[in-house]
Image (spheres, rainbow, N blue to C red):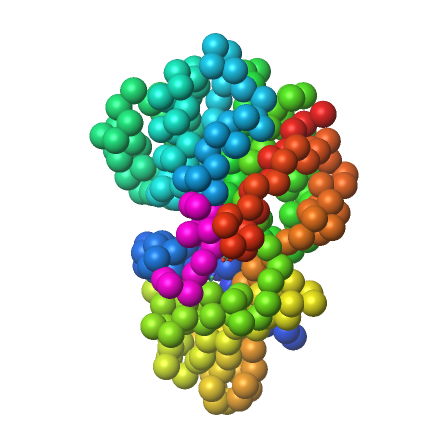
Amino acid sequence: MNSNFKKDINDGLSSPIKTLSSKYFYDTAGDALFVKIMNLPEYYLTKAEFDIFKNQTQNIIKSLNIEPDTFFELVELGAGDGTKTKELLKVLISENYNFKYLPVDISNNALDKLKANLNTELPTLKVSKKQGDYFDVLDSLKASNHPKVVLFLGSNIGNMEDEQAKLFISKLSNSLNISDNVLLGVDLIKSKDIVLPAYNDKSGVTKAFNLNLLNRINNELDADFNIDAFSHQPEYTEKEGIARSFIVSNKEQEVRIGALDKVFKFKKDEKIHTEISRKYNDTILNTILENSQLKKVTKLLDSKSYFADYILIKS
Ligand code: AVI
């Protein structure tokens, strides 16, 4: 990780338009800040998807190609703390479905916590954790021929550029067998007055989450970023349907990164692009699915129609 991290930081800060990848947000401090984000009043995404999982569990189950007597694997990519999934797991257990839950996450720490929590709350559930990057884990799905349901929730796909999302979906599709399902959770395009506060909360947690990337570079690559000399700047246009986060330099300054033995110059107001959070509608989803064998079965919405869980089938 460290050598990739070092190379990516060097490439991103050396390019004429500076960028840093949002995949590096999630160190221990970043994980904890993201948990706080999910509980913020402005961050509607988690609450909206929880509403679908809590109130439409039967609709989810009906739309999946599963039978109580046929064993299947329930794989979750980027499982996190499993709060939403537990609503589904509880009902599947109470209805005697024969399945195993396979949470996948980049963080072993998050997986251990989830497994311990599930052992206590749902002691009869069979759980097998897999640690890794989801792109890499997809290949290992092919190893078993059991029917599968793959959960990819939380609008995690929104943090990919469209080309990358297409590639990911076709790789996911190729790793599945005919009739397997995918449950894809996406945030929907809506007005700026709802989306922008979710990325610019009053209490400053999202600001700390974005700027934590500079802390991480300081800690892991021996850099001397002065965090107070940079600001958090989120942007969103409803027309495009993409929220973008930037770190902006408050003044002309130089930062030394010891591990690269290099000094980077920042102009006053120069931006570093850190994240995209793409919002979806049916047309955009169709484009992403275009070159895959995944077809839409159902679309489930929360009570405010802010968020959608699409159920897809490989055909
Ligand atoms: C993880 N991901 C879907 C979040 C999002 O909404 O794009 C990450 C996040 N970034 C700022 N706030 C939350």
Q: Assess whether residue 28 is covered by the magenta stretch.
A: no
Q: Is residue 121 above or below residue 205?
A: above
Occupied quadrant, residue 42: bottom left
In this rendered view, identify the residue nearer to me: 9 or 154: 154
Q: Count the numbered circles shown.
A: 0
Which range of residues does the magenta coloring cover?
A: 40-51
Occupied quadrant, residue 208: bottom left
**Does 313 sit left or right of 4 as displayed?**
right
Q: In this view, does 284 lie above or below 71?
A: below
**Does 205 sit left or right of 196 as displayed?**
left
Q: Where is residue 129 in the image (x, y as percent from the top left)?
A: 39, 30
Identify the residue at image location x=56%, y=53%: 305
**Does 291 sit left or right of 80 as displayed?**
right
Identify the residue at image location x=59%, y=55%: 188
Q: In this view, does 141 lie above or below 67?
A: below
In this rendered view, identify the residue nearer to me: 209 or 6: 209
Identify the residue at image location x=26%, y=23%: 123
Quadrant including the C terminus: top right
Q: Position of residue 264 (x, y in %)?
A: 51, 77
Q: What is the residue that sits farthest to the top in this orientation?
A: 69
Q: Where is residue 296 in the image (x, y as percent from the top left)?
A: 68, 36
